[in-house]
Amino acid sequence: MNKRVYLLTIVSFVVGMVELIIGGILDLIANDLGVSLGKAGFLITIFSLVFAIAAPILLTMTAHIERKRLTIISLFVFLIGNALVIVSQTYSMLLIARILSAVSGSLLVVLCVTMASNIVEEKYRARAIGVVFMGISASLVLGIPVGLMLGNAFGWRAPFILITALTVLSILGVHFFMNTLAPKPAIPIKEQLRTLKNRRILFAQITSFLFLAGHLTLYGYLTPFLKMTLGLNGTWVSIVYLIFGVAAVFGGGIGGMLADKFGTKPTIIGVIIVFAVSIFMIPYTTFAFPLFLVVMVIWSMLSWAITPAMQSYLIESSPETSDIQQSLNNSALHFGIAFGSMIGGIVIENASVENNATVGGLLIILALGTAVLSMTKKARPSQESAHTIS
């Protein structure tokens, strides 16, 4: 496989880190800027929301621009956004910086996937896309512990200094090692959304949205949860996040094996049920740290175990529009992150962080309902044919 795919994977990893890296240093940012935890958490919400909306729009608007040139331009904008984070002295300035990073980052992820699929032989195309997505998923899982360790040691701006440095290296790498790549006509947004007329697809995408929303309601505020309920200091919080990240990475592999062995539908339903039980249990395990860790590992593993099964299920449900479904599912996941982090902030502001797990669990129950609807509800003939792209 073309080794330049790994360069694109690094770019996707750097972009992905920015989304959730703030989650581990919420309290540091809140204290430094004099805002509440809920308001600090909105920095995750706004990034994910802009990320989900901007990607399909920008892809259509920039369809005529050569891909290597567009990637370098996007990386420069991404660099400026993260440099602004470093120098931000007010919440408003930090919010603007996050929006700038999200807009450019959303386009970069799509470009990485597109370029990776075009620089390899057809027989390696699926593997290349998978490798790029590994960079994204690894960044979402490991971004928080990396940010937490650097933030506690050197201040909350330190993680963004690292990201800025990695962005500069990414620009140099793309400039010197990537070849020019002619653009291809983009699929109009209306045509992409038309595939959601298939009820099976629609409810599957809603399931992804609700699942991530329920997860982020607690995970986005895990640092204050750990400090307030378990009394952990910064070092122990970093250790917990590291355990969480490692377990989540293994969970993605386990989820793929389960889907291959038992099928996508049983895996999706089973993961959602056990995930719901684990997140509901979290607040009731804080009296014993070892017990909490056991339940947390289960929760973290299942948080990514559903992804391979869901991706495969979408391909099975609509093989002729699989590329579009992967793109829409990426938007659904980021909408879920935005919604979950927003709900989590509201819960903290109006109740207590101890209630975040329960609220998140309720969203997971809704995800179970939409998953069942997707797998059992028969679409009308007119709807079944709607997902075919003409």
Image (cartoon, rainbow, N blue to C red):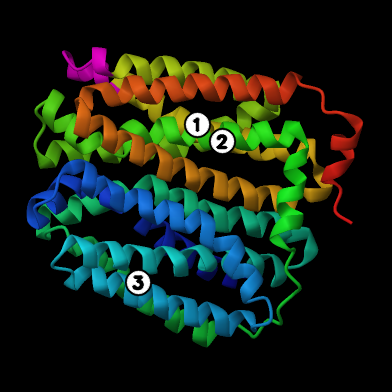
Mark pair 2, 1: CA separation: 5 Å
Select label 1 or label 3 by which is in front: 1
Mark 2 Cα-neighbour bin, 10 Å: few <14, some 14–19, many ≥20: many
Q: Position of residue 9 (x, y in %)?
A: 51, 63
What's the magenta region?
Answer: 283-293
Callouts 2 and 1 close, C-beta under 8 Å: yes
State which quadrant residue 166 falls in.
Answer: bottom left
Mark pair 1, 3: CA separation: 31 Å
Please tell me whether residue 69 is drawn above or below residue 383 in the rendered image. Answer: below
Instruction: Characterize the magenta stretch by its predominant secondary structure.
Output: helix
Question: Residue drawn 8% across and 56% down?
Answer: 32
Question: Residue drawn 66% across and 70% down?
Answer: 60
Mark 1 Cα-neighbour bin, 10 Å: few <14, some 14–19, many ≥20: many
Q: Where is residue 45 in the image (x, y as percent from the top left)?
A: 36, 48
What amino acid is labelled 3 in the image?
Answer: Leu
Q: In which quarter of the image is the N terminus?
A: bottom right
Mark number displayed over residue 166: 3
Identify the residue position indicated by label 2 in the image. 208
Question: Residue drawn 58% across and 72% down?
Answer: 4
- Does residue 251 appear in this view? no
What amino acid is labelled 1 in the image?
Answer: Phe
Q: What element carries label 3?
A: helix
Q: Position of residue 255 (x, y in %)?
A: 57, 31
- Does residue 325 appear in this view? yes
Identify the residue position indicated by label 1 in the image. 211
